[in-house]
Image (cartoon, rainbow, N blue to C red):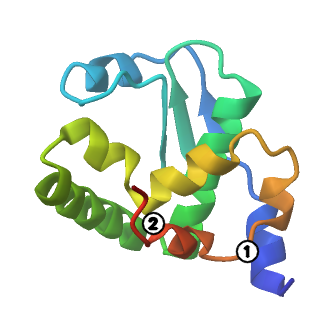
Amino acid sequence: MNWLQKWISKKKPWVFENNKLPVWLSKIAPIEINALSFACFVFCRGEISKTSLRHETIHYHQQLELFFVGQWVLYGCFWLLGLIRYRSLKKAYHENPFEREAYDNAKKYTYLEKRPLCNWRRYLTKAD
């Protein structure tokens, strides 16, 4: 494990529970949003579970390793490509490699400490 991987693995986002942002975004999103990660913040509509916090922290680590803007741009590109490919807003969201990594590993208690840098790249291959 290199120094950058160690540094990122120790970073935790600031969590804002009982926040209205996920509620408002759910009105325009193809999914019901319970929590979201943006920069070093996690916004949650109620109290956040350990699994949801791990999921959002994986996104935070993805953003850190891609200097935030890089992850946001790639996320949007993957989502658009998924939309073209699947013709479904929901499927485009779930097939995004950033989401696939977060969902696949959100229940693994030690994943954040052991996560390889840019591990989302493993999820670039077709899922279905």
The residue singled out by tag 1 in the image is: 116
Q: Nearer the viewer, residue 34 or 126?
A: 126
Residue under the point 29% across and 22% down:
26
Mark 1 nearby-residue class (10 Å; few <14, some 14–19, many ≥20)? some
Res 118 → quadrant = bottom right
* Left or right, 53 with reference to 43: right
Rendered view: 1 above or below 76: below
Q: Is residue 41 visible?
A: yes
Residue under the point 63% across and 61% down:
61
Mark 2 nearby-residue class (10 Å; few <14, some 14–19, many ≥20)? some
* Left or right, 16 with reference to 124: right
The residue singled out by tag 2 in the image is: 68
Q: Position of residue 53 (x, y in %)?
A: 67, 35
Q: Residue furthest bottom?
A: 2
Q: Position of residue 106 (x, y in %)?
A: 69, 42
* Left or right, 117 with reference to 88: right
Q: Please name the amino acid that badge 1 sits on.
A: Pro
Cα distance between the residues tagged 1 and 2: 17 Å
The answer to which of marks 1 and 2 sits earlier in the sequence is: 2
